[in-house]
Image: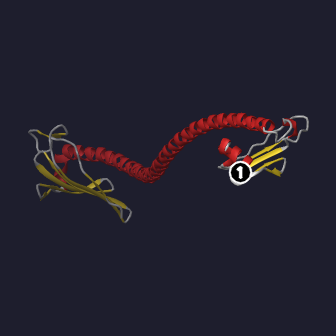
Amino acid sequence: MVTLLITLSARAQKTNGSDSASIDADRHTNYYVTHTSQGKQVERLQTDWNDKVYKMELVNDKMTELYVNGEKIAAADWPKYSKVIARIREQIRIDKIQAKKDQEQAQRDQVQARKDQEQAQRDQVQAERDQAEAKLDQEQARKDQQQAMKDQAQAKLDQEQALKDQEQAKLDQKQAEEDQRVMKELISDLVKDGIAPDEKSINSVTINTSEMTVNGKKMSDAVFARYKEKYARFANGSFTYEDDHGGNRGVHISRNE
């Protein structure tokens, strides 16, 4: 058995005749039910129409019962109500068509609602992924910022160290030039003091805190004391002068202070 329940939405207008009505005036609908029983289509309806309650049953589109305000109407009197019944049945036909459209639309809406729900779930999953990705990006940005600050601080230290190294290089160069000048003065003094006949004869000189040698020969304490006092900078560490006389004169000075 298949049952269909719809709400009639027509409008009726009261006239002078009990069987006459128009679908333009207000009325209220109670129910309309249709089903199939033993191969026959059975329709039952009850509706307010023109301030009267009509209740009828139809089998295979033929009316079998009619009640008006609860009073059963004999079949011989049905023609009196033919117009109003026709309008009611026409409205039923229209409402059945609309009900079918509404049902189809409801099915489409249900399908769309399911799609929307599935899309909403996908959007939620994607949103969670985006949120997690954004959190990772934010954390990475924070780490990058910290690293950038460290790199900036290190760059500043490196720059300061480079300036110090540059200043130290200038000082070292100046000191090297001074050492070269003093070394030449020392070689000149060795010649003046008769320790060596000339500069070319001097192959090596060493001075430290305990002794002085020239060409590997240890100098007397008096000579050592005099040179130690005059060349205290060399004597306080370890000064070595070497010249191999191999064409190009080479000088090596090492000093540990």
Colouring convention used in this rendered image of the protein: secondary structure
Tell me: residue 42, above or below residue 228. Answer: below
Foreground residue among 12 and 255: 255
Q: Which residue is drawn at 79% across and 45% down?
A: 205
In the image: residue 44, left or right of residue 107: left
* Residue 108, horizontal then vertical, whole percent: 40, 48
On the rendered image, what quadrant is the N terminus found in?
Answer: bottom left
At label 1, the amino acid type is Asn
Q: Residue at x 10, y 38 (%)?
A: 15
Residue furthest front as drawn? 222
In the image: residue 213, left or right of residue 124: right
Residue furthest right as drawn? 246
Count all numbered tags in the image, as a single digit: 1
Foreground residue among 65 and 123: 123
In the image: residue 237, left or right of residue 48: right
Residue furthest left as drawn? 16
* Residue 220, horizontal then vertical, whole percent: 77, 51
Q: Quadrant of residue 191?
A: top right
Q: Which residue is drawn at 15% across and 45% down?
A: 27
Foreground residue among 61 and 179: 179
Tell me: residue 177, above or below residue 146. Answer: above
Give the structural element (helix, strand or loop) at label 1: strand
* Residue 91, horizontal then vertical, whole percent: 26, 44
Query: Label 1: how many residues lie within 10 Å, few (<14), some (14-19) or many (20+)?
Result: many
Residue holding disc 1: 208
* Residue 21, horizontal then vertical, whole percent: 16, 41
Foreground residue among 203 and 60: 203
